[in-house]
Image (cartoon, rainbow, N blue to C red):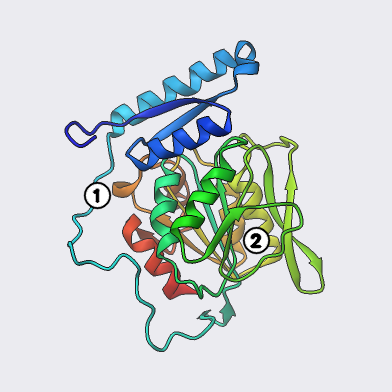
Amino acid sequence: MATNPVPIIMLSSLTTEGAHVTLEALEHGAVDFIPKNLSELSLNILRLKEILIDKIKVLARRGLPRRPVRSACRTVTPPLPAATPAVRTTGERRMSIVAIGTSTGGPKALQEILPSLPKEFPLPIVIAQHMPPNFTGPFAERLNQLSKIEVREAREGDVLKPGVALIAPGGGHMRVARKRGIEASIAISEDRENFIYRPSVDALGLSVAELFPGRALGVMLTGMGNDGLKGFTALKKSGSRIFAQNEESCVVYGMPKAVVDAGLVDKVLPLDEIAGEIINSV
């Protein structure tokens, strides 16, 4: 990657060891990965072939996203304004939650955004990243090591807390639900339902729109396809705000393009500005 940077796709087995190696490859510059379940390879080999060919075509056309030139003395963490209140308001509504959706290129994008958030970040964060089982746990652990906030894989019944980012477990849909009184928690479903991906950004977005109408910040990051369009449409209709990653910094400008083209987005931002805008918006 240092001498001849090109898009690299990892094809990895569904094991914890494979997950760690794949995540390490992503940190070194690989742009995407495709898991192969060796126990079911004979059953899904044709589907695996289709996915691999589609991704190769998209990434070959796209190439690597352009990265901004950073000053050697540039501060990575966006500073909080001196007079920032504990919770900012948008219009007359308080922000209560940040919901992030992403797919191809998402691990690298999240690795830039989450470590830039301050330890005292005032809201809970929920994340749907297209990943298989055995990958989201190590991925969350790695982000937690890099971040000031707490980052971990979500579990059934987890209570939403400020400064805690919960990543949807691979192979399951994550939703927010009312637990008791005003307390909100996580609900996990392993049924495929009517969604193409598990975890689904649509499933998460729809639940956030229902539980926090007009009080959420939706952030759509790099990814293939249009998962999240329905969920973010519901968020926007409820009065919430939507940010999308810009085309130039995306590995694949698919999911952000879908919400931009639908007229849902309040701001289109390069990756290196998203963390700062999140901080300033909550």
Relative depth, front residue between 273 and 229: 273
Q: What residue appears at the point 45 percent right and 22 percent down from the top-left corner? A: 52
> Mark 1 or mark 2: which comes first in sequence?
1
Residue 5 point in image, percent of width and height: 22, 34
Circle 1 residue: 67
Residue extending farthest top: 42
Residue 42 point in image, percent of width and height: 62, 10
Residue 203, numbered circle: none
**In which quadrant is the N terminus drawn?**
top left
Structural distance between the alpha carbons of marks 1 and 2 = 33 Å
154 relative to 264 in the view: left or right: right
Q: What residue appears at the point 16 percent right and 33 percent down from the top-left corner? A: 3
Query: Which label sits in the foreground, 1 or 2?
Result: 1
Regarding residue 224, the answer to whether it shows in the image is no
Relative depth, front residue between 262 and 192: 192
Q: Secondary structure at mark 1?
A: loop
Circle 2 residue: 209
What's the residue type where badge 1 is placed? Arg
Question: Image quadrant of residue 79?
Answer: bottom left
What's the residue type where badge 2 is placed? Ala
36 relative to 69 in the view: left or right: right
Q: What residue appears at the point 56 percent right and 54 percent down from the top-left corner? A: 232
Q: Secondary structure at mark 2?
A: helix
Residue 178 point in image, percent of width and height: 78, 64
Residue 241 point in image, percent of width and height: 51, 66
Residue extending farthest bottom: 83
Mark 1 in CB contact with mark 2 (< 8 angstroms): no
126 relative to 8 in the view: left or right: right
Q: Is residue 62 above or below residue 243?
A: above
Question: Image quadrant of residue 129?
Answer: top right
Regarding residue 269, the answer to whether it shows in the image is yes
Could you classify mark 1 by the number of other residues whose Cα lies within 10 Å: few (under 14), some (14-19), or many (20 or more)? few
